[in-house]
Image (cartoon, grey):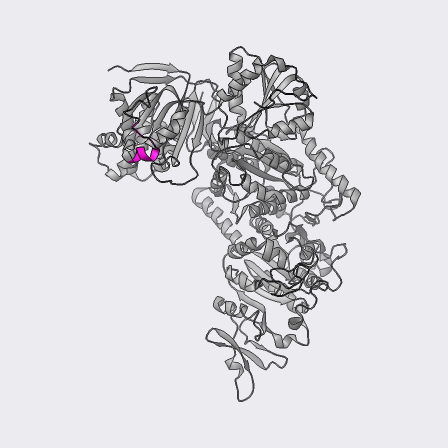
């Protein structure tokens, strides 16, 4: 049966090639606080969209609740601002029903790790093709400053005046544990790098998870300073790039080496260990991805940034379509009249 | 010995055994055959929530009741005329349903010491006088089954599995039923497994032959054909009817169908059915929880699907917040609630009508939505089409109430001709230049549907209050007042687009019996019996609960007294009292079981005889019992 949707999709989409970032800025004020990390994600996203070559009416941003939830209002595409924690199932239903769309989810550490935690792990394993940008500011901001599932133990917030007692999730490790195929981490202070990550997430077919450190100036200012500040970040983060050695440090004089399954820091200097001793990143290796993800809360190791894992696996909505096609090919297109008749019927004359 | 032939107008047969005895299967076959033979039929599956409870226990008893006859079969039958019991426990549990002098076909092999002990019988009811008021036919089921296979080469393992079919054969003899419907079902079901087909067909015939030759079976009953409108018929449960209704509605609306659901008794059969409809292009997601079920459906609705979520009470509670989102975003969505006995986990496999208040008001904020209730298994089809029509025309979520009784009970359904069903036309936005997401059709007050892919209509919607027309987020106080009122007015206005309430019997007078949902069958039967006995009362049935039919107020005013039977403590009664300021009497039952028509008949007879409260004081406190 040809549906109305099919007819709508048949209409030619014009002008996709001539779009600029301006076309993605709607005529509304951005109401995030000045200096909010979210703003630093908005502009790379708006800049990236024209590069995708997708008509903007085919792009949908879906969000949940929290500061991140406002994101769709600031993108002149189709957008859906859902309810707390439910952005992923809303986006999943949309993408399964409409595989032709480019679906983006914007969520936060509270929305996605706490109230939406169940949806998150299932979305990871289901592998619906969508890009999830999780703004992690390690605090509940829209409710004005309570500790979140990514707050560190001891964090002082309005609801933990004596320090939070729980240990945080490590979002990338959680995603890997739940079988997400694409897992990456970026931050709000390097927009070029971030735009690159978003592009990679888009290019990956299946569920793409990008954790983005976003600074909350009001309730958790400077939480990521060590990893994002130009002065310190080179020494405290390591940028992961497929096929490249894990070298870091201001002078690029340090590297990560595996001692068994344990990553250790080695100094690169003449006569000592060389670049050849350094671990080379392989984003297709899921064992390695776990090892790298677990460097996150280490006190001595640099924090891994970039793409931790990028695996190819068929996406859920593809399988749905394949199953339908297979049924139609082997049994023929369903005949509604015979469906109504069912297994056995009788006739009254 | 010659058999006695007796003609009957209607009969109720109940098959009972252990959960694993295949009683649901033979009950279904028996009812299909009754339909095939031209009778009106209504069934009631009564099974435990345990999957395979320990054999022989009282709580493991599974039963299937079939009420069939020549006319006016609206319920699954008040009292059982014939009980087939496979063991002592199933006799014990089901004997209270059997009328005096009823026929008991008992598998005596299920009455050994162990079975008797498990059933809590001190003596053996087969030999003491427990069953003196009944006609008992003892059958050594396994032994007779084996005898029937003496000359047939079938492995004994297969033979043992056909014991239920043998029992079915006995009942087919009893009512002189044709075997062909079941034989053709066996052939289809076990296609390619010739020995299984042979075993089952032979067991069916064996049961028939056994009864035919057995002197204990003296009487054979004939039930004449019903006068039914011509057409093709099939047996259908409410859950099947919903599933079919959804596929047909999507086809009529030329929309893809999407179901987001999470398994829950007694609604899961809808998910089962839809998940098998892949070749009709249907998509479904078995979600990680109830919330994801509805959330995915909302996402699909945003993308232009006819979106549905199916559930039962506990699931409906979980979906409340998301329903509010669908109301706020004004997206079409069908929520099917197959009600069960609550609160909390309650009686998961048993029926109740106690989600009405939740369906009406179970959301935060002013969150009106249309609520429909199917009257019977077959009516589930039509009401599903109605739910889709209203959802798409008015851009609103619609709640369709069914319940465990009609969801799982079956009755014959006249299969509609597709091209005679009304078209359903969703209204999509067309003009990008003038499009705004919350501009409304002045007649229906519904907003236009613009879906991703439509160029120039990119827009953002969500749970935040929107400015009228533009759909821009707005916290303006007066705008909120306006939007709340608009959403209410939109739903209220649907009253102009649904049939008026029809009164059966006198159009005005003393007493109106008003039913809703699955109580239709029992109420209608009680009404027919009482009027046949010369009593005067009128009957009306509500299928639209929000909004109510616009003549409901007038109808209520035309009667001195109105009584509402419902499987809750008076939820519709309270709604109607509050809305129309008229005192209503309730007949309420919360036992996990549907009304028997006799229960309603008896209480209505009391009311009819209570002349002194005939003039019901509308605004005075009444000492007489308001609920019966």
Residue A152 spot, x, y in % from top left: 61, 65
Q: Is residue B304 above or below residue B96?
A: below
The residue depicted at 51 percent of the width and 63 percent of the height is: A311
**Residue B195 occupies which quadrant of the picture?**
top left
Q: Where is the C terminus of chain A found, in terms of image quarters? A: top left
The picture places residue B225, in percent across and down from the top left corner, at 42, 18
State whether residue B293 is above or below residue B118. below
In this rendering, the answer to whether B396 lies above or below B125 is below
Where is residue A125 shown, x and y percent of the image?
51, 56
Say which residue appears at 62% left-offset and 82% top-offset: A251
Left or right of A184? Residue B233 is left
Q: In the image as oriented, which residue stretches furthest toward the left?
A: B151
User: Which of B443 and B424 lies nearest the eye of the viewer?
Assistant: B443
Q: Is residue B490 visible?
A: yes
Left or right: where A347 falls relative to A130? left
Whether the magenta-drawn stretch holds residue B57 is answered as no
Q: Residue furthest bottom?
A: A271
Q: Is residue B423 visible?
A: no
Q: Position of residue A116 (x, y in %)?
A: 59, 53
Q: Quadrant of residue B150?
A: top left
Highlighted magenta segment, given as a residue range:
B114-124
Please say if A297 is above or below A316.
Answer: below
Total label count? 0
Most foreground residue, B324 or A289: B324
Q: Which of these two is toward me, A156 or B579? A: A156
Could you tell me which quadrant the N terminus of chain A lies in?
top right
């Amino acid at each position: 049966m040809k549906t109305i949707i099919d007819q709508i999709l048949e209409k030619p989409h014009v002008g996709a090639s001539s779009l600029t970032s301006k076309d993605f800025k709607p005529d509304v004020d951005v109401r995030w606080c000045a200096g909010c990390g979210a703003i630093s994600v908005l502009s790379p996203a708006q800049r990236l969209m024209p590069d995708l070559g997708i008509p903007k009416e085919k792009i949908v941003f879906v969000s949940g609740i929290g500061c991140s939830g406002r994101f769709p209002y600031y993108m002149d595409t189709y957008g859906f601002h859902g309810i707390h924690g439910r952005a992923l199932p809303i986006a999943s239903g949309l993408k399964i029903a409409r595989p032709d769309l480019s679906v983006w989810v914007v969520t936060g550490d509270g929305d996605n790790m706490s109230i939406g935690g169940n949806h998150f792990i299932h979305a990871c394993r289901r592998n619906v093709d969508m890009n999830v940008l999780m703004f992690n500011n390690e605090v509940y901001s829209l409710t004005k400053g309570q500790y979140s599932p990514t707050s560190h133990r001891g964090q002082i917030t309005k609801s933990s005046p004596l320090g939070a007692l729980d240990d945080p999730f490590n979002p990338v490790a959680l995603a890997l544990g739940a079988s997400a195929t694409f897992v990456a981490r970026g931050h709000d202070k390097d927009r070029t790098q971030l735009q690159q990550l978003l592009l990679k997430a888009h290019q990956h077919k299946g569920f793409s998870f990008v954790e983005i450190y976003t600074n909350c100036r009001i309730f958790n200012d400077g939480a990521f300073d060590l990893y994002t500040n130009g002065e310190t970040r080179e020494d405290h983060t390591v940028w992961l790039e497929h096929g490249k050695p894990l070298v870091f440090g201001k002078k690029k004089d340090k590297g990560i080496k595996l001692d068994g399954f344990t990553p250790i820091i080695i100094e690169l200097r003449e006569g000592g260990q060389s670049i050849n001793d350094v671990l080379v990143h392989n984003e297709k290796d899921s064992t390695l991805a776990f090892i790298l993800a677990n460097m996150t809360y280490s006190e001595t190791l640099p924090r891994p940034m970039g793409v931790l894992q990028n695996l190819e696996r068929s996406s859920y909505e593809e399988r749905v379509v394949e199953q339908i096609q297979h049924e139609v090919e082997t049994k023929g297109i369903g005949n509604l009249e015979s469906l109504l008749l069912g297994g056995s019927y009788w006739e009254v004359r | 010995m010659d058999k006695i032939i007796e003609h009957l107008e209607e009969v109720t047969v109940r098959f009972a055994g252990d959960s694993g005895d295949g009683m649901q299967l033979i009950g279904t076959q028996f009812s299909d055959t009754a339909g095939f033979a031209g009778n009106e039929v209504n069934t009631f599956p009564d099974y435990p929530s345990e999957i395979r409870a320990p054999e022989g226990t009282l709580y493991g008893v599974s039963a299937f009741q079939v009420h069939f006859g020549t006319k006016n079969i609206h319920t699954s039958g008040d009292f059982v005329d014939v009980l087939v019991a496979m063991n002592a426990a199933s006799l014990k549990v089901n004997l209270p349903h059997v009328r005096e002098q009823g026929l008991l076909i008992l598998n005596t092999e299920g009455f050994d010491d162990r079975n008797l002990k498990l059933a809590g019988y001190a003596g053996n009811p087969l030999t003491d006088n427990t069953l003196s008021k009944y006609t008992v036919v003892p059958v050594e089921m396994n032994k007779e089954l084996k005898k029937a296979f003496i000359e047939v080469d079938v492995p004994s393992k297969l033979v043992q599995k056909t014991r239920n079919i043998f029992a079915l054969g006995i009942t087919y003899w009893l009512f002189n039923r044709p075997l062909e419907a079941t034989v053709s079902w066996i052939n289809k079901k076990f296609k390619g497994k010739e020995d299984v087909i042979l075993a089952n067909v032979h067991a069916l015939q064996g049961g028939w032959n056994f009864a035919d030759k057995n002197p204990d079976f003296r009487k054979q009953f004939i039930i004449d054909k019903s006068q039914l409108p011509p057409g093709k018929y099939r047996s259908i449960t409410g859950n099947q009817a919903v599933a079919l209704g959804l596929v047909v509605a999507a086809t009529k609306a030329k929309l893809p169908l999407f179901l987001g659901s999470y398994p829950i008794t007694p609604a899961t059969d809808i998910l089962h059915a839809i998940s098998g409809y892949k070749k009709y292009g249907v998509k479904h997601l078995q979600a990680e929880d109830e919330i994801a079920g509805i959330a995915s459906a909302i996402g699909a609705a945003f993308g232009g699907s006819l979106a549905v979520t199916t559930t039962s009470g506990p699931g409906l509670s979980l979906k409340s917040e998301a329903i509010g989102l669908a109301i706020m975003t004004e997206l079409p969505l069908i929520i099917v609630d197959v009600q069960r006995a609550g609160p909390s986990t309650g009686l998961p496999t048993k029926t109740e009508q106690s989600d009405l208040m939740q369906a009406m008001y179970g959301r935060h904020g002013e969150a009106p939505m249309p609520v429909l209730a199917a009257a019977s298994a077959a009516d589930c089809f039509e009401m599903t089409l109605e739910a889709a029509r209203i959802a798409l025309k008015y851009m609103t979520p619609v709640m369709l109430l069914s319940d465990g009784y009609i969801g799982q009970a079956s009755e014959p359904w006249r299969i509609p001709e597709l091209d005679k069903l009304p078209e359903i036309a969703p209204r999509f936005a067309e003009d990008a230049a003038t499009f705004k997401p919350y501009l409304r059709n002045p007649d229906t007050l519904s907003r236009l549907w613009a879906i991703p892919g439509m160029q120039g209509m990119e827009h953002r919607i969500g749970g935040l209050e929107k400015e009228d027309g533009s759909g821009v987020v707005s916290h303006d106080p007066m705008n909120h007042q306006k939007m709340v009122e608009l959403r209410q007015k939109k739903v209220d206005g649907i009253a102009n687009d649904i049939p008026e309430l029809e009164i059966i019997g006198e159009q005005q007078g003393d007493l109106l019996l008003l039913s809703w949902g699955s109580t239709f069958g029992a109420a209608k039967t009680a009404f027919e019996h009482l009027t046949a006995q010369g009593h005067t009362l009128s009957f009306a049935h509500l299928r639209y609960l929000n909004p109510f039919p616009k003549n409901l107020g007038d109808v209520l005013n035309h009667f001195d007294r109105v009584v509402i039977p419902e499987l809750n403590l008076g939820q519709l009664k309270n709604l109607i009292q509050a809305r129309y300021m008229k005192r209503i009497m309730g007949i309420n039952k919360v036992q996990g079981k549907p009304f028997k028509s006799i229960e309603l008949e008896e209480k209505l007879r009391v009311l009819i005889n209570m002349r002194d409260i005939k003039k019901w004081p509308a605004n005075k406190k009444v000492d007489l019992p308001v609920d019966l």
